[in-house]
Image (cartoon, rainbow, N blue to C red):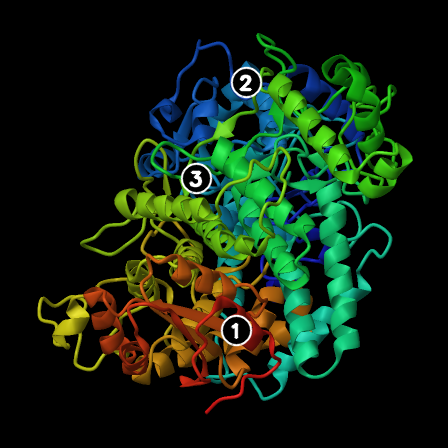
């Protein structure tokens, strides 16, 4: 039964549930789901409740009272000693909260009571609502304190704990979300689960206080049944999630079929009128864009330009609609989490780092294909937002900004979107003579503009308020005003800056300044790639706020600072392990698969875009250096390691990604190291949602690394990738739309030979920088760029040890006064190109002639 349910669980939820932060119940904030279920109990536990109650009444109450934390410090609990912003928000609740810890588990065993586990994150709107309604309520707190041990978990700090109980809720109730509310036995087996509960019984549904009383009664009177049910659920989940490969590689033809099937499924869900794939609520799921662009490239290469253009048309129109919509912060840059309506208009206003990093990359891809600065400006808009608002003093990149904020200074109540929305009068007062132009451009109305869809604002939350959206073409509006287009755009830019300055004086949304390794990896990739691809913009180009304009090389510096922060603060040079996150010090949680996979991907991009070979060395350290890759015996537990000395200079041989996560017999990677006994499940994640899965990214990393190194190491990388993908054969065959990036990875592995672009010269020279930009100017996901400076002893030693062909090319083609590019397949290369123009011409050809 659970195996069947898991077809729509964490691996591949139904199309309505594709977002990671709302991937289990991706409904608008107005319509949260409430679930409550315990298989062995009667009402209210015997039913699943997709909540049909009048959500607007709960929302109205929340809007009138929501605060991110209690303003009365009559109470202080153990969370006050934690670093997580989410836990600190609950540090002064009357609930006697514990963090996830042995202390809490021991207390539950000692008192012989169930555990109430509450999981959320600091920028979660409905987490705030439940805190105010229930966790700040002294009556609720007394019930929790008397009958339970209460544990609070930040899902961003402990995704491993969240995964266990979200998988349980999702598998049994076909839905989920945050806040996640689960009751556990003292040995951590789930007894019953749900999401958001209102405090009181309403509309025929149980409130939180009723739930607490029912669980208490069941624990006292039906404990054996409860405990057996929880143990059985975990046993069944463990069995269902222990996926193994039937062979070491995918069947012939499956990668191409999966790629085609996924593209066809996405095309059928395409909204030709308003852009995007699927209906409201609409999420910017970048992996869908990546799949469609990759598929279009394959169609083009196979002589089907018509099909390629059709796929590209869907992508470009979707990206345009997203950028013009209210989901895009036109005043300050960056993108909100999702839109509640089909127009990309009224968003859920939180901003997540993982969205920003991925969206930069897909807009960069669109620019590299079209050379249309519309897409490069959106990329810059996001990058400049991150540089301005989301980066710490040491280069670390913060995780999120909240959706809720106070309307004015000193106000204790918070409302969603208060920081971002405008009245027509405010715009008139701020912009003066240019107000009418701005109002027409951004669809601003005196009565408010959240009227495009019945889903935009069904309960008049934003009556009289405006969420900026571009509904008309700039050129047409400029022509209507008999105004040169550049003058029109300049006025819009100046107006946005004026609104930005006023908005900056409003109370800001809460900033979650936690540093998460995986999300920083996505951002590192974006900044690194932007540093080269954006050099393709025309010289003397005019930018307007919130794009501030800069030398793209500044973006490379941002990427390097972020990577250095992780290396200094979240990487142990002795054990070669990552920690998952940082805030006032490293978190207790170890690095998870996503941390390793996303960081490795970012480091590879950092190297390929001109960074030091040190980044490539670190990426290979993190990926794997286990015994089967290196000649000579290696024992991780032994002080004696036999291997060539040159490798000792570059690679650590302790526990890294493969040692921590790889299922050597069954294939693929688990999401956790499996060393924490309090984490009951190890999951092999495959679903590419709001974030790609660690396995999809790892497969691509392995393919990329295999194209750089040679010999047995290259073979081993490819074998590991093939074994990994074989684990998910059924998913690729039957549910390709759930794993779009994995479809790309499978096809990449089947490409007979990736294209390598080897650049030889002084890396510090302007000519080398221009050649690098040319190497990255064209869109080609099956291309590897290898920049090498033969005068750098360390670089040459690295390539001598890992790919002697690259070292030989460098020596034979080096000249002190020029830069040379070689375009190769399997390191058999075309005649050298000695100018950026000749390299671009060479790479723009459909096939590379080799000699």
Report x, y in % for residue 584.
Answer: 32, 31
Q: Which residue is mark 2?
A: 136
Q: Nearer the viewer, mark 2 or mark 3?
A: 3
Report x, y in % for residue 592.
Answer: 39, 54
Residue at 63% across, 28% down: 208
Q: Is residue 750 above or below residue 101?
A: below
Q: Which residue is mark 3?
A: 397
| Closest to the observer, 301 or 674 | 301
| Closest to the observer, 550 or 574 | 550
Identify the image quadrant of the C terminus.
Answer: bottom left
Q: Which residue is mark 1?
A: 838
Distance between the alpha carbons at the discs numbered 1 and 2: 67 Å
The tag earlier along the polypeptide, 3 or 1, is 3
Q: Residue furthest front?
A: 817
SS of the residue under disc 3: loop
- The reply to whether residue 726 is in sight is yes
């Amino acid at each position: 039964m659970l195996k069947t349910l898991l077809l729509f669980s964490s691996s591949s939820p139904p199309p309505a549930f594709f977002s990671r932060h709302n991937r289990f119940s991706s409904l608008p904030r107005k319509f949260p789901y409430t679930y409550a279920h315990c298989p062995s109990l009667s009402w209210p536990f015997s039913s699943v409740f997709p909540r049909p109650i009048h959500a607007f009444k709960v929302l109205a109450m929340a809007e009138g009272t929501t605060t991110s934390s209690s303003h009365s410090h009559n109470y202080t609990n153990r969370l006050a000693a934690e670093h997580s912003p989410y836990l600190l928000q609950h540090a002064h609740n009357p609930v006697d909260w514990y963090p996830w810890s042995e202390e809490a588990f021991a207390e539950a065993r000692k008192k012989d009571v169930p555990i109430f586990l509450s999981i959320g994150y600091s920028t979660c709107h409905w987490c705030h609502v439940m805190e105010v309604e229930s966790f700040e309520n002294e009556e609720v707190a007394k019930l929790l304190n008397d009958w339970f041990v209460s544990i609070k978990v930040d899902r961003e700090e402990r995704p491993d704990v969240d995964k266990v109980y979200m998988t349980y809720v999702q598998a049994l109730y076909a839905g989920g979300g945050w806040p996640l509310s689960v009751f556990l036995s003292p040995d951590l087996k789930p007894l019953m689960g749900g999401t958001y509960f209102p405090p009181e019984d309403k509309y025929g549904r149980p409130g939180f206080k009723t739930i607490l009383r029912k669980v208490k009664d069941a624990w006292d009177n039906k404990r054996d049944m409860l405990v057996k049910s929880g143990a059985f659920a975990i046993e069944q989940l463990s069995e269902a999630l222990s996926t193994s490969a039937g062979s070491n590689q995918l069947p012939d033809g499956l990668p191409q079929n999966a790629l085609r099937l996924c593209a066809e499924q996405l095309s059928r869900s395409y909204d030709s009128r308003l852009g995007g794939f699927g209906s409201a609520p609409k999420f910017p799921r970048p992996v869908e864009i990546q799949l469609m662009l990759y598929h279009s490239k394959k169609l083009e290469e196979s002589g089907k330009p018509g099909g390629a253009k059709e796929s590209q048309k869907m992508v470009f129109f979707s990206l345009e609609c997203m950028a013009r919509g209210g989901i895009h912060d036109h005043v300050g840059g960056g993108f909100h989490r999702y839109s509640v309506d089909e127009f990309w208009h009224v968003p859920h206003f939180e901003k997540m780092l993982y969205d920003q990093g991925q969206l930069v990359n897909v807009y960069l891809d669109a620019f590299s294909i079209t050379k249309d600065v519309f897409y490069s400006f959106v990329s810059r808009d996001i990058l400049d937002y991150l540089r301005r608002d989301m980066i710490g003093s040491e280069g670390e990149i913060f995780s999120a900004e909240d959706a809720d904020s106070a309307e004015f200074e000193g106000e204790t109540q918070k409302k969603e979107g208060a920081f971002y929305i405008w009245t027509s009068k405010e715009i008139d007062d701020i912009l003066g003579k240019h107000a009418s132009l701005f109002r027409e451009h951004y669809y601003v109305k005196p009565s408010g503009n959240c009227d495009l869809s019945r889903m935009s604002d069904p309960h008049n939350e934003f009556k009289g308020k405006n969420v900026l959206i571009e509904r008309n073409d700039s050129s047409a509006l400029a022509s209507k005003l008999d105004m040169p287009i550049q003058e029109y755009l300049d006025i819009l830019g100046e107006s946005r800056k004026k609104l930005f300055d006023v908005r900056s004086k409003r109370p800001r949304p809460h900033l979650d300044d936690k540093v998460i390794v995986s999300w920083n990896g996505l951002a590192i990739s974006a900044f690194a790639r932007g540093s080269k691809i954006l050099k393709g913009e025309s010289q003397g180009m005019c930018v307007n706020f919130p794009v501030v304009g800069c030398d793209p090389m500044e973006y490379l510096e941002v990427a390097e600072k972020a990577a250095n922060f992780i290396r200094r603060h979240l990487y142990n040079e002795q054990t070669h392990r990552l920690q998952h996150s940082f805030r006032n010090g490293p978190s207790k949680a170890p690095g998870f698969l996503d941390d390793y996979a996303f960081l490795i991907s970012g480091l590879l991009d950092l190297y390929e875009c001109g960074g030091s070979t040190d980044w490539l060395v670190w990426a290979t350290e993190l990926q794997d250096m286990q015994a089967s890759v290196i000649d000579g015996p290696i024992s991780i537990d032994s002080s004696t390691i036999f291997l060539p000395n040159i490798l000792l200079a570059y690679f650590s041989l302790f526990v890294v990604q493969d040692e921590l996560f790889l299922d050597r017999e069954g294939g693929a990677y688990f999401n956790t190291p499996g060393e924490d006994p309090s984490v009951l499940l190890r999951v092999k994640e495959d679903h590419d949602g709001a974030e790609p899965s660690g396995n999809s990214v790892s497969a691509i990393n392995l393919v990329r690394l295999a194209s750089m190194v040679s010999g047995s190491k290259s073979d081993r990388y490819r074998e590991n990738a093939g074994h990994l993908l074989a684990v998910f054969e059924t998913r690729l065959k039957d549910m390709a739309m759930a794993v779009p990036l994995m479809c790309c990875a499978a096809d990449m592995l089947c490409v007979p030979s990736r294209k390598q672009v080897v650049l030889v010269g002084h890396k510090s020279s302007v000519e080398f920088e221009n050649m690098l930009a040319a190497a990255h100017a064209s869109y080609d996901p099956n291309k590897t760029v290898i920049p090498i400076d033969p005068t750098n002893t360390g670089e040459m030693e690295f390539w001598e040890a890992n790919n002697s062909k690259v070292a030989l090319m460098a020596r034979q083609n080096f000249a002190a006064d020029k830069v040379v590019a070689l375009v190769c397949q399997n390191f058999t290369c075309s005649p050298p190109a000695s100018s950026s123009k000749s390299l671009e011409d060479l790479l723009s050809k459909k096939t590379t002639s080799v000699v």
